Image (spheres, rainbow, N blue to C red):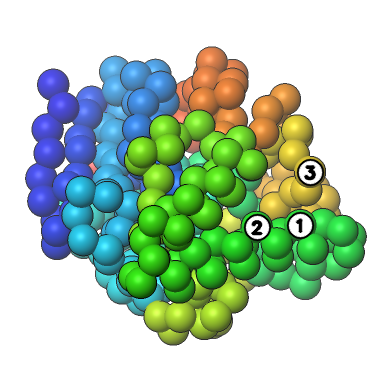
Amino acid sequence: MPTSLNVQGLEVFIEGSGPTVVMLHGWPDSPAVWDETVAALRDSHRCVRFALPGYDLSQPSRPVSVNEMCTLIAAVVDAVSPSEPVTLLLHDWGCFFGYEYAARHLQRVVRVASADIGDTNTGAYLQSLTTKEKLMIAGYQLWLAVAWKLGPALPGLANRMTRFMARQIGCRTPPGQIGWQMNYPYAMQWFGSFGGLRGVERVDRLLGPKLPTLFFFGKRKPFMFHSARWLAQLATAPGCEVKGLDAGHWMMKQKPAEFNATLRAWLDKHPSRPPTEAVNAK
């Protein structure tokens, strides 16, 4: 049966037994985005998930900085797995924040499986985008950043703006579970709110060189969130794999059987701890 605990105001859900997998969702989702994945893994893995700060609309708005987000993730990991490193399973903004947590706490993460967000903070990625793609990305992100700014004074308008954009990009989260409070990462990105996003670790220096990685990407999207050069590099790195699915951004919902089978096979193939640690632990 699933259990839960409260970690610094976050309700953390735990299900299954075995090596711990900490799951971070993105915009505008909730821990429910991982429902099918938990069902596929819980017989062999201990699945841990929680709503990112501000994404539980039953709670007050809770925007956090990158430092504060990493501190919260660290508190959850330390609470659920104090003596063993964990696997991170990430999607969308969960990738961004999960990568930075891993970079700062490398000894607490043994491997990373991530979906659809790759080397977006590198020059190679920016150079890979066409002008049209850059305008499309800026358009939807600025829209959501503005909705965040309007939220405190005009919550009804800000919610309508947020839910409109979620529909436009094919999000499957029910509209009633989407709110402007979730948009603060876009305000961080475009307005520098809450300290902005500067100074984070480059993804191409973390995934592959420092951590075994399984990277999923959806093929049916108007633009990618990774560069082809980085994808090729990651595919040949030891312990790493890449998997393109005939899906959009929410591939764990659009192609759950293929996504979960690939994930399960990769988790079973690679150890949950580095070999040197496993030997030392005996």
Q: Position of residue 234 (x, y in %)?
A: 70, 49
Mark positioned earlier in the residue sequence (3 or 1): 1
Mark 3 in CB contact with mark 1 (< 8 angstroms): yes
Q: CA distance from mark 3 to mark 1?
A: 9 Å
Picture quadrant where residue 140 is located: bottom right
Q: Secondary structure at mark 2?
A: helix
Q: Tag on residue 140?
A: 2
Q: Tag on residue 136?
A: 1
Mark 1 in CB contact with mark 2 (< 8 angstroms): yes
Residue of label 3: 222
Position of 148 with respect to 233 (left or right) is left
Callout 2 amino acid = Tyr
Camera sees residue 22: yes
Q: Quadrant of the N terminus?
A: top left
Mark 3 in CB contact with mark 2 (< 8 angstroms): no
Q: CA distance from mark 3 to mark 2?
A: 13 Å
Mark positioned earlier in the residue sequence (3 or 2): 2
Q: Residues within 10 Å of mark 1 (few under 14, many from 20)?
A: few
Callout 3 amino acid = Pro
Q: Position of residue 45 (x, y in %)?
A: 31, 28
